Image (cartoon, rainbow, N blue to C red):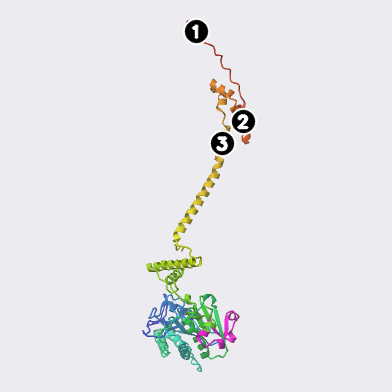
Amino acid sequence: MRRNETSAAGYEPPRYRAADDAAWYHVLHGNVPEHQIDLMYGPEIPQGLLTPTHFSHMARLMKYIEPQTNGTHAFAIGNLSRDDTQHEAGHGAIALIFAFRIGGATDHAGRGHPPFAHGIAAIDREVRPASLLEAAAGFHRRMMNEGDSDSPAGAFYRAYVRAVLEHPDGVSRVLARYVEAFDDLPRLPRSDLSLAWAADPGAQPRRVVIVHGDDEPFEAVAGVASRLAAVLFRSSIKWTAITTGREADIPGGLSVRLVAERDVTTEDRQGRLLRIKEVPEDEAAIARTVFSARPYGAGLEKLKPVGWRERYAAQGAQAAGAPEGAARTGPEAEAARREQAAADATRAGGRAEAAEGGRAQKPPVVERPPWRSWIKGAVVGASATLAAVASVLGVLSEPAREEERRADVAAPPAAVMGSEPGMAAPAPSQARMATSSPEAPPAAARGTRTAQGRGSQRAPARWTQRRTPPPAPAETAEPTVFDSAPVFR
């Protein structure tokens, strides 16, 4: 065993190595002198079937468990496999915990009645009402020893405080002797249980409260707690603890409280509340009445905890028409699904042909892979996007085209520009063509009407005023050689 050490690096609790066939792992939690409330003693982790997940749940339950205001102790049955990914119903880990307030002692800060808790954990052991009740009753007798002025738990805690303060080297021996006194606790056999009860998570209450009399004996309370734990141990229900304490509920699971009538609170009345006499003796009745569960196999097979591979394989098999529980994966599964689809199509065609008097059987519908639909959707979306971009570009380019049209209208005609000072006059043939054309109006007039009709800027007056070109010189006949030549008749 390791020695208890308090140094600048921090507190290290003593650890022990249990036997390979140990039925119970012991954990002590409470006030450590000259330190704080912390782990006092525990097994090495990991060890055997005990995992860090089990131990972390155990430490959390022991840290927060608290006796009722009017009670001498608190008792709890905790589920240590709530977040265990490898957990199977009937093969989990449970803990029995007792918590006290030690009278006549003070903690590290000088406060009276320091806390002390002792828990024992069993992993993959058979949990049945009778055997669990026997273990809880034996544990209670070792802890309480009612009738004495000082309980064994109180006597041990005082011896532990003296050893820490006066003989630090002997702390491990004090702890080991205390734990060895519980070696005769009933041993639970290895579990061969399986899932027996299943429930819809949506129909589960967050809290179940069992109310008992103020002077109810421990055996009666522990008997009800054992029956409830045996049902939950073999169920698909996610539960945290069954407790008689007043600590807050641990989130993420169902909590069961056994409360005396004098300690019932308003919060307790908001959950599912039953009297201790209303709790049935039969496990099937408990599952149905207290936890709204039914026997596994009564239409609730899908609630069995499975991994993600099995879950998605089952969904694929159901989509292909295969019976539930026969899910397969790989090429064989694909071939089986195709055969099943073809058979279904054949049966459907035969029924239609018989109903309609020999109508030709339709070929089976071939289901296209989903990626074709994805590609088609992408192409349609891209086309719509391109059309929208083209429309926007057309709207944006419309003002530019309008400006070009206006510039064409406002440009001066070539025939008029030739009459400006400093510019060459048009040729006589061009002038005659411009003035003698009866079909078209003058170029200047066309430009004037076009500019005025469009409502745009008017052309300058020098462009629209027509100037008369100078007259062309008279043509005179020039003598030729034929005029002086003799005429032959």
Residue 280 lies in the magenta-colored region: yes
Q: Position of residue 215 (x, y in %)?
A: 56, 91
480 shown above or below 258: above
Name the amino acid type tagged 3: Arg
Q: In the displayed structure, does residue 271 sit left or right of residue 330?
A: right
Instruction: Judge the density around disc 1: few (<14), some (14-19), many (≥20) Cα neighbours within 10 Å.
Output: few
Which residue is denoted by mark 3 in the rendering? 405
Region in magenta: 256-285
Q: Secondary structure at mark 2?
A: helix
Q: Residue 4: x, y in percent?
A: 40, 81
Between 95 and 33, the one nearer to me in the picture: 95
Instruction: Indicate the secondary structure of the residue bearing disc 1.
Output: helix
Q: Are marks 1 and 2 in contact (CB under 8 Å)?
A: no
Q: Where is 3 relative to 466, above or below?
A: below
* Cβ atoms under marks 2 and 3 closer than 8 Å: no
Tell me, yes or no, if residue 194 can be seen here.
Answer: yes
Sequence-wise, which precedes: disc 3 or disc 1? 3
Disc 1 and disc 2: Cα gap in Å? 53 Å
The answer to which of marks 1 and 2 sits earlier in the sequence is: 2
Q: Which residue is mark 1?
A: 483
Q: Residue at x 51, y 10 (%)?
A: 478
Amino acid identity at mark 2:
Thr
Q: Residues within 10 Å of mark 2 (few under 14, many from 20)?
A: many
Label 3: which secondary element: helix
Q: Residues within 10 Å of mark 3 (few under 14, many from 20)?
A: few
Which labelled disc corresponds to residue 448?
2
Q: Does 187 sit left or right of 240 as displayed?
A: left
Q: Amino acid at mark 1?
A: Asp
Q: Nearer the viewer, mark 1 or mark 2?
A: 1
Q: Who's the residue at 45% across and 61% down the image?
A: 370
